[in-house]
Image (tube, rainbow, N blue to C red):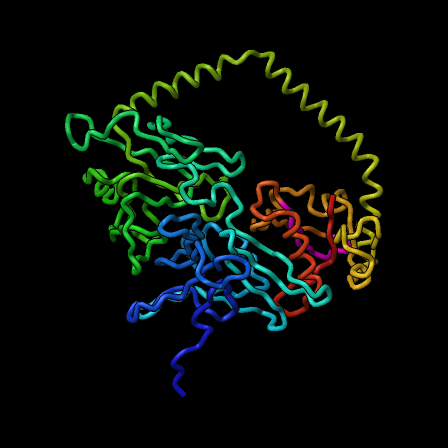
Amino acid sequence: MDILWQSFDYPSNTFLPGMKLGYNNKTGKVWSLTSWLDEEDPNKGDFEVSMISNEVFLMRGTEILWSSGPWNGHGFDLMPEMRLNYIFNYSFYSDENETYFSYSLYNPETITRFSLDVDGRMREFAWLENYQQWNLLWSQPRQFCSILNSCGSFSRCFEDTQSCKCLQGFYPSENRQGHNGGCIRSTPLTCGNGDNKDGFLGIDDVTYPLSSMQQINTSNPFPYLGPQISISNENSCKEACLNNCNCSAYAYNTTGHCAIWYGDLINLQQLSSNYPTGHKIFVKLAAFEFNNGKVLAANWHVWISAIPVVLLVLLTASFFIFRWRKSLKNKGEMEDARQDILLFDMEMSITASSNDFSGSENSRKRRKDPAFPLFSFASISIATENFSLENKLGEGGFGPVYKGKLLNGQEIAVKRLSKRSGQGLEELKNETMLIAKLQHRNLVRLLGCCLE
């Protein structure tokens, strides 16, 4: 039977398991999400979510509001929560006919949906049967740096401080309004004129930027949108950018592909040094900037070496005072912490109505909750060796994940909510409640939680 039309191919504002988000290269058909005009009117609204090449964009007309980052084989670069895919099975497919993103569920009994709402936010919901309601698990854009071009051109975005900083060799534009006015060059590029050649400034642990002269290349194997050249070595990649007056930056990856950016660089986000999807790019600067940069570096070194000795004494004293106060506090907590772990090992159901997980939920809903042990922060800290770096397994959308060990030798995994997380406490609670109600082979058993 040939299907001439089906509503499943027209997602409207809702993205369900098995649906496609992408496009057909031959027919020109596009699978995208469009917001409603308002809560009651399903006519097309102001916002659209669509895929271009290997990246998902949230747009209002021609204005790009948010980007998922490129697909890296496991998920999208700027959506780290996708790495903890114990509920969803994500997939990206691309050939000469079609390019699309889709997802399925490991447990078919789980009911979820993604929606593009009238306020321009994408949200993921899961249905909790006991409560007979949809619970929010995820939403975007949430983070300051997730909003495309939030800092303007030639500027780095810092999520932890929600601030912007011009790249070396650039200064804030006079027309800058708020954050996104961007930065402009302090010294024009020579572009081969004169004796001194332009050079490159290496920047580590950043996202791949976009550019004002971006070109869409759907067959590009390099994980970003833009021009790409197959070059056997990094030096040739560097020379290709150096010899092109419009080239602003380049990057060279381990697969032997060279990427170059033309025009203004935008959407450059600074990541932490241990962030798994961080990259290194090289931004072109005038030769004068490098000479001046060395002088500034030398002066900074002299200034550092001249710091008064009293500062060192104060820091040392502060350290010992901190350790002394912490040791006094730990003495009082140690026995309680060890008792918590013993209770954890015995798998006792620790439930206190005053610390009910749902907080404001009424007694009727509490009776529907499964036994859900609550543990002190001190007990979890001991199990993970005070959240040591050696015990860190990785990092997701909520924050870092650590391995731990109970007194009976059982190994556990602890997910800790980070202050810098794009997801809030409410989303973490909702996901935890969902996991507590799910039991299948792809999902580890939830033992308990800590709300301190």
**The N terminus sits in image quarter:** bottom left
Q: Is residue 69 magenta?
A: no
Q: Residue at coordinates 34% horizontally, 49% vertically from top-left?
A: 253
Q: Position of residue 432 (x, y in %)?
A: 68, 57
The single residue placed furthest to the front in the displayed view is 41
Residue stretch in magenta: 406-417
Q: Would you say 241 lies left or right of 303 here?
A: left
Q: Position of residue 296 (x, y in %)?
A: 37, 19
Specify whether residue 99 is in view.
Answer: no
Q: Residue at coordinates 82% horizontally, 52% vertically from top-left?
A: 342
Quadrant housing residue 441? bottom right
Q: Would you say 210 lies left or right of 87 here?
A: left
Q: Residue at coordinates 42% horizontally, 41% vertically from top-left?
A: 206
Quadrant housing residue 148? top left
**Is 169 above or below relative to 147?**
above
Specify whether residue 303 is in view.
Answer: yes
Q: Position of residue 271 (x, y in %)?
A: 47, 41
The single residue placed furthest to the bottom in the displayed view is 1
Query: Which sits in the foreground, 169 or 144?
Result: 144
Q: Residue at coordinates 37% horizontally, 33% vertically from top-left?
A: 182
Q: Is residue 412 magenta?
A: yes
Q: Would you say 58 lies left or right of 438 here?
A: left
